Image (spheres, rainbow, N blue to C red):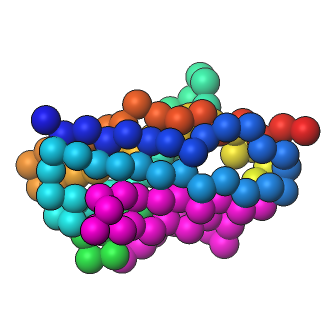
Amino acid sequence: QVQLVESGGGLVQPGGSLRLSCVASGTIFSDLDMAWYRQVPGKERKLITGITSGSSTIYDDSVKGRFTISRDNAKNTLYLQMNSLSPEDTAVYYCYGRTPEMQYWGKGTLVTVSS
């Protein structure tokens, strides 16, 4: 059974930083293309950044230059380094993984940016 478990969310002041982690189990992590999505109440879940099994990355314009996605295949872990956070970044952040056959979601971690 594949599980993705996020951690690292919390309350941070505007301009601050957070690092989210997503630990995968029950699968060969290095085979997965991975991504981070976020969702604000009342809005659709949105892709903000992704990293392929070969470590190619993409970023949504809203986070480009502020957020960095990375992976450590030895630790079965996906990371999201978030810098220069603003209240507009407040959301539930979800870890996502996929193979050609399957898709997997974590349960999410809440990030709140507020003074």
Residues in magenta, as a range: 56-84
- Which residue of the protein is positioned furthest toward the front in this rendering? 75
Judging depth in this view, the residue of 10 and 101 nearest the camera is 10
Position of 104 relative to 15 (above/below): above
Q: Report the number of discs.
A: 0
Q: Residue at x 84, y 46 (%)?
A: 13
- Which residue of the protein is positioned furthest toward the top in this rendering? 42
- x then y, percent, for residue 34: 33, 57
Query: Horizontal placement of 112 versus 94: left or right?
Result: right
Q: Is residue 18 visible?
A: yes
Judging depth in this view, the residue of 4 and 98 nearest the camera is 4
- x then y, percent, for residue 109: 53, 35
Q: Residue at x 25, y 38 (%)?
A: 3
> Image quadrant for the C terminus?
top right
Residue 67 in the magenta stretch? The answer is: yes
> Image quadrant for the N terminus?
top left
Q: Is residue 49 visible?
A: no
Q: Residue at x 60, y 56 (%)?
A: 19
Position of 64 relative to 77 (above/below): below
- x then y, percent, for residue 30: 21, 66
- x then y, percent, for residue 39: 55, 35
- Which residue of the protein is positioned furthest toward the right in this rendering? 115
**Which of the 4 image quadrants contains residue 78?**
bottom left
Residue 22 in the magenta stretch? The answer is: no
Query: Horizontal placement of 40 versus 98: left or right?
Result: right
**Which of the 4 image quadrants contains residue 64?**
bottom right
Query: Horizontal placement of 85 versus 47: left or right?
Result: right
- Which residue of the protein is positioned furthest toward the left in this rendering? 101
